[in-house]
Image (cartoon, grey):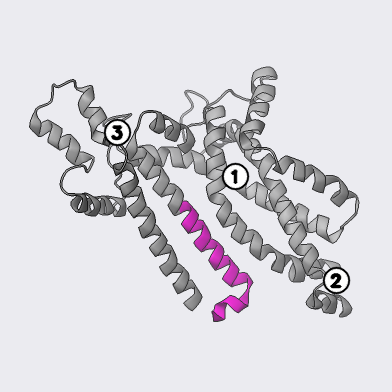
Amino acid sequence: MLYILRRVAFYLAAFFVAVTLNFFIPRIMPGDPSARIIASFQGRLNEAQVEAIRASYGTTGSLWEQYVGYVGQVLRMDFGISTVQFPEPTSSLLFYGATWTLVLVGIAITLAFLIGTMMGIHAAWNRGGFFDSVFTPINVMLNAFTPAVVALLLFYAFSLQLQWFPLGRAHSTGLMPGWNLQFVGNVLYHATLPVLSILIVSFGGWHLGMRNVMINLLNEDFVILARAKGLSDRRVRYRYVARNAILPQITSLALSVGFLLGGALVTEQVFNYPGLGKFTVTAIESRDYSFIQAQLLLLTMSVLVANFLSDIANVILDPRLRKG
């Protein structure tokens, strides 16, 4: 419990630092978020209207007053108004984009972790065998590719040439969203190529990581003792070796969340997928500071939450941490 409380204190401090940096970085850049909206009215606004727009973007008052107001907005999950889709609230755009990105990254990261980890276990247990000799070098090669390259190749081959998959969007036009087989199946169909583009370059890392850690553990005394006691290969492999080898994998899984979200930005652009990546690129091009700030904060929170969940998983799997 003490270990978890220390980690919670650390993540709260990290969140506070992230919120502070997220507030100051846009303000040291030239211009402010409200200037673009005010300029678009070409002088047709009176002083009260200009002040109201500046207030909605939190650019009135002293810097300390702006900071306190910003922290209050963050705690209420109120990120102001988008300048690109004025007067649409940034939080609603962020929620819409995050939903589709979570579908994409959630499926990809789950499949990559499960497939790569199981391949690593099998390769390490049969080190030097056919599976290890063939698939380990292949996965080393695939791990060197970037999601952008794979996404472009898949898009060209299966969407443009063979036309087996759609050119973009998260679901077919005119299909009403709902929790039914038709809509869910349509969403999965549209997400197939984007998920594959992330999955192909991701699972090799889990394979190599699990394989290397397991090979180091195979010569440990507790494994030799377990074999000497006559325990079955299956029990030694999963209960003794894989259970200990998976601890660094879980930590890496938490750290990879930020990388995968970054990879999803490019993938979403290639497949015209309406996730955070597509909205973020549009926001950067249009200097939509409200959305950029909210997206960066969401990315930071995702990484912190993922790391906290990995800490809990490590405590469950490794009883020694419960004493810390």
Could you say whether the residue bearing mark 1 is in a helix, strand or loop?
helix
Residue drawn at point x = 52 percent, y = 36 percent: 265
State the image quarter where residue 46 is shown. Answer: top left
How far apart are labels 1 and 3 at the CA level? 29 Å
Residue drawn at point x = 80 percent, y = 70 percent: 236
- Residue 226 location (% of width, % of height): 82, 77
Q: Earlier in the sequence, mark 1 or mark 3?
A: 3
Amino acid type, callout 3: Glu
- Residue 217 location (% of width, % of height): 77, 69
Amino acid type, callout 1: Ile
- Residue 276 location (% of width, % of height): 46, 38
Residue drawn at point x = 56 percent, y = 55 percent: 255
- The residue most toward the left is 47
| Of 193 and 72, the residue lying toward us | 72
Q: Neighbour class for label 1 at 10 Å: few (<14), some, many (≥20)?
A: some
Give the number of the disc on residue 232.
Answer: 2
Q: Earlier in the sequence, mark 3 or mark 2?
A: 3
- Residue 219 location (% of width, % of height): 83, 71
Could you say whether the residue bearing mark 2 is in a helix, strand or loop?
loop
Q: Neighbour class for label 3 at 10 Å: few (<14), some, many (≥20)?
A: few
Amino acid type, callout 2: Ser
Viewer-side label of 3, 2: 3
| Of 62 and 172, the residue lying toward us | 62
- The residue most toward the top is 161
The overriding secondary structure of the stretch rendered in magenta is: helix
Residue 164 in sight here? no
Residue drawn at point x = 58 percent, y = 66 percent: 313
The answer to whether 17 is drawn above or below residue 273 in the figure is: below
Label 1, on which residue? 107
Residue 78 in sight here? yes
Give the number of the disc on residue 88.
Answer: 3
Which residues fall within the magenta stretch? 302-324
